[in-house]
Amino acid sequence: MVTNNIEEYKGVYVFAQQVDNEISGIALELLGKGKELAAKLETEVTAVLIGYNVKGLADKLAEYGADKVILVDDPELETYRTEPYAHALASVIEKYKPEIVLVGATAIGRDLGPTVSARVQTGLTADCTVLEIGDFPLVAIPGQEQKHNQLLMTRPAFGGNTIATIACPDNRPQMATVRPGVMQKIAPIAGAKAVIEEYNPGFTPNNKYVTIKEVVKAVSDTVDIMDAKILVSGGRGVGSAENFKILEDLAEVLGGTVSCSRAVVDNGWKPKDLQVGQTGKTVRPQIYFAIGISGAIQHVAGMEESDLIVAINKDETAPIFDVADYGIVGDLNKIVPALTEQLKAA
Ligand code: FAD
């Protein structure tokens, strides 16, 4: 890896992912985290908005904490493709020299982030769940320089069996992709106006690798579990795909959405996009029902930030009760239908 002059690099930059002219939730979450990091470093947070005819989105980024917006707007950027987007973001990094660059660990970000980090010759920590400013190494080691104000990037490693904190002390920018649903947005500042700086590094039509012929949108009549306010989540204890009907009935009465553990997905009872946890989605609903879920660490990692957790399990020693606000010990086949009936009658 090539080292560069660290002192030249300033500011926290967030890739403001947009799809179909709509800012993705992860961009707002990253602005919230970026603002916190920028305050510690006494610097600013800048959103990098890339697309075509997307200028109108800049004020929303200001409302959610961006001090400045760098806009790269070009017909080549209408739909995401690796090559023009990587060219856009890498050019912004080369021109503005940010200290930190944050990208969402979405399908787009997982493609874009590593491509750009390789292009600007710096490191990237993927799929982070915690970002902090601190010293690296974390504890002073005799004979080794401890560097201050480093971005400490924490992520699960070795299949979730350990948590690793990683830094990039000798190069800039420090780059991370961050799991959606983990960081907190700030409360929006109504009426905030963005300071926009337009920058176009120049694009030549580049269809060498990818030509988009047609965009087919996924059609779904269910709420994304990351957006749901109430989740009724089932585990292996539910027993079968058919028996999820009792959870669906409860969800319907509550106006909630059904989600599940990985065991359920592995059994083929529910699709992967309903899976909560380390290798599924991170959720933060107002109420999370954990029904027939044991509470394995990899599951809890994806739901422990829920406002209120209600666990139903026949085993009173199940670890899920350690994170639950309310626990009901008993057979879910009796408790869940009874709860649904009570709520219907209420
Ligand atoms: P179990 O652990 O089998 O628990 C079933 C529970 O149901 C038990 O507590 C039992 O007491 C209860 N039960 C049974 N019958 C009834 C009944 N009639 N009434 C009431 N309670 C009943 N898991 C995830 O969920 N999400 C992830 O993203 C994820 N990622 C992983 C990543 C890695 C690298 C690894 C190694 C594992 C991962 N796992 C994940 C798997 C995780 O370790 C557990 O195996 C899984 O969460 C267990 O699912 P479960 O709680 O539904 O099943």
Image (cartoon, helix red, strand yellow):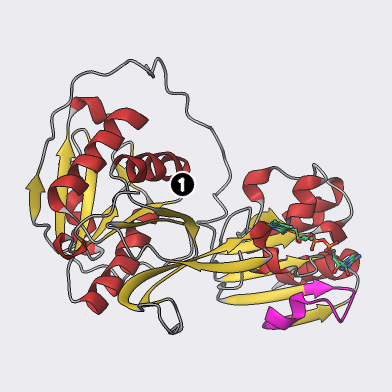
> Relative to 218, is 182 above or below?
below
In this view of the protein, can residue 289 be seen by the observer?
Answer: yes
* Quarter in which the C terminus is drawn: bottom right
The amino acid marked with disc number 1 is Thr
Please report the bounds of the magenta region as a residue range: 312-326
Work out which residue is located at the far front of the displayed protein and give it.
143
Q: Residue at the spot x=28%, y=39% of the render? A: 21
In the rendered image, residue 86 lying in the magenta stretch gets the answer no
Q: Residue at the spot x=22%, y=18% of the render? A: 205
122 or 294, nearer to the observer: 122
Q: Is residue 266 left or right of residue 67?
A: right
Residue 207 location, quadrant: top left
Residue 169 location, quadrant: bottom left
SS at circle 1: loop
Q: Is residue 190 left or right of residue 119?
A: left
In this view of the protein, can residue 56 be seen by the observer?
Answer: no
Q: Position of residue 339 (x, y in %)?
A: 78, 70
In the rendered image, residue 320 lying in the magenta stretch gets the answer yes
6 or 242, nearer to the observer: 6
154 or 306, nearer to the observer: 154
Q: Position of residue 9 (x, y in %)?
A: 18, 60
Residue hosting label 1: 106
